[in-house]
Amino acid sequence: MSRMTRSVVIGVGVLAVSAIVGVLVGPVHIAPGDALRWFVSFGHLPSGMSEQDAAILSNLRLPRVVVAGLVGASLSASGAAYQGVFRNPLADPYLLGAAAGAGLGATIAVAFGPETAFAVTVPFAAFVGAIVGVGLAYLLGRSSLGGRSATSLVLGGIAVASFLTALQTFIQQQRAETLRQVYSWILGRLGTSGWDDVRIALPSVLVALTTLWTVRRLLDVIEVGDLEAESLGLNVARLRMIVVIAASLATAAAVSVAGLIGFVGIIVPHTVRILSGASYRSVLPLSMLFGASFLILTDVVARTAVAPAEIPIGVLTALVGAPFFVFALRRGARVT
Amino acid sequence: MGRRRTSIVWLLCSLVLVLGACASDKPPTGADETTLTGPTSASFPVTIVTDNGDVTIDERPESIVSLSPTATEMLFAVGAGDQLEAADDQSNYPAEAPVTDLSGYEPNVEAIASYEPDLVVYATETGDLGASLDALGITTMVLPAAAKLDDVYEQIEQLGLATGHETEATEVTEELRAQVDAITTSVAPVSRTLTFYHELDDTFYSVTSSTFIGQLYTLFGLENIADEADDTGGGYPQLSAEYIVDADPDLIFLADTKCCGQSAETVADRPGWDRIAAVEDGNVIPLDDDVASRWGPRVVEYLQLIADAVAVVEEADAA
């Protein structure tokens, strides 16, 4: 069994275990045996389990685990894709301005859009915002700050993110009635996830992740440099655009259902690289698997650590992610 | 002015009516009207013990700036509404409040000073607000969020004293106390402990019994499902949806009807929530976000809503 196959098997196993833990553990105690029997029998109520418990499992816990998985997979895969396409180990939906752009877009949609159409307008506005954010960060990093070093792109991203966040704050201030909603959304929210969120996110996530999956080998080619890749017959500009659009679509889908959850796109791909090497053939699929597992497990902590109260999920990922970011930065500095 | 007085009296009377104790042969007497609207004999200077120390007011303030919606409501209640020059952008009650662009969250000292106030009242010290106004020679009073009902009465009396409406303020607080007593005793002894969930927003932030809002419910012997999360949220924990569904509260109070557009219908539509007793029995009570977040005279309206909601459950239990 090759190293990659082994890693994928491990990844699938970890995801399965995470999902089971995610469904079985929560502030309301439901006997694991009963819950498993309930799932296996497709909703046939075993003795000793109340209808209330069944409703909690099917309507609250299960969709929450699914949303956490989709969001985790999207953020990790888009982090890995940005890192490949910009040849920058520190690229991340958060640092590149994609998340801030998506946040601004969603805020504009909430503040000025018709309330009845939020399900459509918010994800779309988030997507446009994410593309604009990454585009600005990339242009700024390349043209104004000179060179294509890791730092210039990250600096560009930080400048863009700060600017877009400032705009978002301004809109919030002007529309005080939306303040509360936007605020809870900024901290990241999985506490209200339902099947509706799955329906909103799933199509974009599937399209985006399938696209990234398809081009994963080409990301290895781009790694050697633009000129070299072109001499091998690769249309670098077109590939870069496809990847950025797909990764931004995944980010936007994640942001529109779960708010801003940072650092997942850094932590997961880097861990995966340590486990299975730097080739995007394995980094991309493994990032999806481990990203889903990571966010499902983090969310278990978010809803049980101080149960029956919750910790905003974005706070937890930042607590883990910020130290990890320093680690990645040091590791990246050594490589270059 | 007169219209306001009358409407307050009418409101009080209607509250009493609800309690079944307002006989039609006891209309508000003329004598009461006179004391309510007549000139007050307060003499200045007065010294008031407030949250920001002893405040001395030399003359009856004639151009007050209020940066606190609650203080605005209190000022009108004690009859000092016409001394109010400007109120902040959140002061949406009563309708005749001189609402401006001034912000209590992001106070702008220059903008406040441009109204040439002789007294500024606000609820929270933001940055150097107090010191900056002091430097301009403007008197300030801080009336922070109440921790208990007694704070409400105390602040109303402080404002009455500060504005030359001491007698009216005393009358208002006496009436409020009487109403609170009447409302809380109007509820029949509870046959079982009723549980409730108070919702601050649609991500399930709630209040515990350690907060002012939470204490209002304890007056009726209600049990707050958020209290179990008390050790974490500093009084305002965010609850898990599954915990709320499992706790199965008898009553749900929505303080997010304005901020987040929630209603009995939207709550019933939430996945899994249709099994909660409060939803099944139609005991989801929409509140006015403002009334349920201020600590002004309208607190009695809020208490009445709680009392009515409890009465409905009691009747259903009895039937």
Image (cartoon, coloured by chain):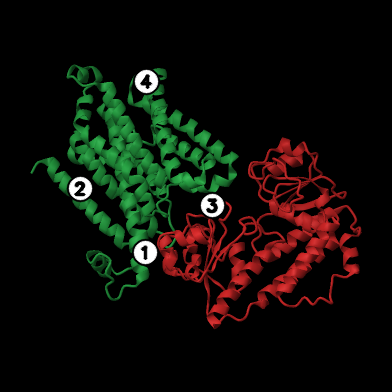
Chain colours: A green, B red
Pick the residue in front: A33 or A89: A33
The quadrant the C terminus of chain B occupies is bottom right
Q: Position of residue B135 (x, y in %)?
A: 76, 38
- Where is residue A269, by image quadrant? top left
Q: Are marks 1 and 3 on the same chain?
A: no
Residue under label 2: A11
B179 left or right, relative to B211: right
Whether residue A251 is situated above or below residue A219 in the rendered picture = below
The answer to which of marks 1 and 4 sits earlier in the sequence is 1
Secondary structure at numbered mark 4: helix
Say which mark, if any, is on residue A56: 1
Of tags 3 and 4, the one toward the viewer is: 3
Alpha-carbon distance for marks 2 and 1? 28 Å
Say which mark, if any, is on residue B304: none
Q: Position of residue B269 (x, y in %)?
A: 45, 59
Q: Are marks 2 and 3 on the same chain?
A: no
Task: Look at label 2 and name its amino acid.
Answer: Gly
Q: For the point 64% across and 77% down, which residue is it?
A: B187
Alpha-carbon distance for marks 3 and 4? 42 Å
Secondary structure at numbered mark 3: loop
Q: Chain of mark 4?
A: A
Q: Chain of mark 3?
A: B
- Where is residue A147, by image quadrant? top left
Residue under label 3: B260
